[in-house]
């Protein structure tokens, strides 16, 4: 049951968030291919694919049908959902902080170890 549920959610995710939903239009592809074969008996599947996908957008009598073929248009525009969160206003100091606290103390760095002494890439030292 878990496998079935995970497969279902994976398929729903892929169809909703990728261009995989274009595979639903495969019936339109087959129908359009058979129409072209009725007009031209010598047209094979590879010729049909080259004509409709690798020859640019040819505007002809069946242009509207051509644009309904799978992967001809990009209509998967799922924006990332955003939730506006109001930011708090910091015009007033929080309670307990005096407004005239004065300057902050200077941080004393003399007690910190030197960072270059622990560096592995040092030039050799004379003894």
Image: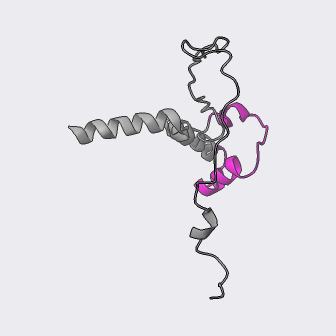
Q: Is residue 117 above or below residue 126?
A: above
Quadrant of the image occupied by residue 91: top right
Q: Which residue reaches farthest left?
A: 1
Q: Is residue 80 left or right of residue 40?
A: left
Q: Is residue 94 left or right of residue 39?
A: left
The one of 84 and 49 positioned closer to us in this rendering? 84
The one of 75 and 120 positioned closer to us in this rendering? 120
Quadrant of the image occupied by residue 3: top left
The one of 85 and 70 positioned closer to us in this rendering? 85
Q: What percent of the width, then of the height, locates residue 2? A: 23, 39
Q: Which residue reaches farthest right?
A: 59
The one of 34 and 58 positioned closer to us in this rendering? 58
Q: Is residue 74 located in the magenta-colored stretch of the structure?
A: no
Q: What percent of the width, then of the height, locates residue 92? A: 64, 11
Q: Quadrant of the N terminus?
A: top left
Magenta part of the chain: 39-68
Q: Is residue 121 above or below residue 84?
A: below
Q: Is residue 50 located in the magenta-colored stretch of the structure?
A: yes
Q: What percent of the width, then of the height, locates residue 99? A: 66, 15
């Amino acid at each position: 049951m878990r496998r079935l549920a995970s497969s279902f959610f994976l398929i729903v995710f892929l169809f909703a968030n990728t261009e995989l939903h274009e595979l639903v239009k495969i019936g339109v592809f087959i129908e359009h291919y058979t129409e072209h074969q009725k007009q031209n008996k010598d047209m094979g599947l590879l010729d049909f694919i080259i004509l409709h996908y690798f020859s640019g957008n040819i505007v002809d009598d069946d242009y509207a049908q051509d644009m309904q073929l799978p992967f001809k248009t990009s209509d998967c525009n799922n924006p990332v959902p955003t939730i506006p969160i109001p930011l708090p206003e910091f015009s007033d100091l929080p309670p307990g902080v005096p407004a005239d606290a004065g300057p902050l103390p200077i941080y004393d760095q003399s007690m910190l170890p030197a960072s270059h002494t622990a560096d592995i890439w040092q030039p050799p030292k004379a003894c």
